[in-house]
Amino acid sequence: MVQGALSFFLLVAVGWHGWAHSRLVAFEDFSPAEQIARSAVSSPLEVVPEGFFLMGTAHHGGKPYGFETQYDDTEQPRRRIWLNAFLIDRYEVSLGEYLRWLQAEQRPLPKELRDLINHMITVHAVQPAALAHWPALYVTWQEASAFCRAQGKRLPTEAEWEKAARGVHGQLFPWGSQAPSPILARFGQYHVHEIPLVEPVESRKEGRSPYGLHHMAGNAAEWVADWFGTDYYAIMPTTNPSGPSTGRYKSVRGGSWKSSPQMLRAATRGGALPEQRAATIGFRCAKSGGS
């Protein structure tokens, strides 16, 4: 009765077209994507001081798949690189933040993400407030870069990402030399329907990097600013390298919820087409300067 009276009032007040528009807006206000966006929480920034750090991996002739051994030649040689101070997100950009940005920019919700959200809510009864803390997934490189710019930030360079992940002494994993475990990172997961088995971006404190960053290994792999250069480590400048000037793939770092332990090494590199949307790739933002 109350709903009917309200509908009649709106019909008289604004006419049929206006009433229909109001109903559409009201529906969208309470859609799952809108609820997720309303639950968004932004990440604080952590400072990475200026200075040298060890980037890449020195050649090892030991067992081919040991953690001390290079994953492939693209992470060689090991170099001593200087970076100016910068700030970087403590957490991966969350799904809630990404949807809030899509809404503000009036960008369409990717079909892959819409299908995933609907599936998680209707089949697995996951609440929108919980999904808001998932890492953003199915994000293209262009969208990740635009999102960071809209926040007054940018994607980290590959060198910045690697220093933030492993510290100045080139440790194997964000947490040190200990082999990955479920306590430290989200990895090695599998689902027959390719449903992302991720965790909240603020989880896994035990696996934090030397600068306090979460999920620099596992959960979602992360876009960085650079084009992926297979031989770039051999020729990059020793001060603030920013990657090749052109390329086909953008660099992706950190491994994901599906990755093997080897892919979680802080030096392991990968790449993807910048327009690719994947259930395994997210991102975090950075900012120049130390404050």
Image (cartoon, grey):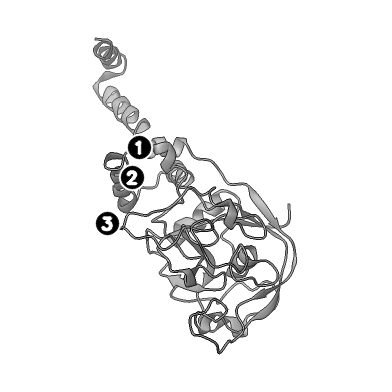
At label 2, the amino acid type is Ile
At label 1, the amino acid type is Pro
Residue 209 location in percent, x, y? Answer: 62, 60
Residue on which disc 3 sits: 193
Instruction: Looking at the image, tell me whether mark 1 or mark 2 is earlier in sequence order.
Output: 1
Residue 193 location in percent, x, y? Answer: 27, 56
Residue 265 vs 33, above or below: the answer is: below
> Is label 3 in a helix, a strand or a loop?
loop
Q: Residue at x 56, y 43 (%)?
A: 42
Q: Residue at x 35, y 37 (%)?
A: 32
Give me the disc on residue 117.
2
Task: Determine the CA span between mark 3 and mark 1.
Answer: 21 Å
At label 3, the amino acid type is His
Q: Quadrant of the N terminus?
A: top left
Instruction: Looking at the image, tell me whether mark 3 or mark 2 is earlier in sequence order.
Output: 2
Point out the frontmost of discs 3 and 2. 3
Give me the disc on residue 32.
1
Residue 30 location in percent, x, y? Answer: 35, 31
> Is label 2 in a helix, a strand or a loop?
helix
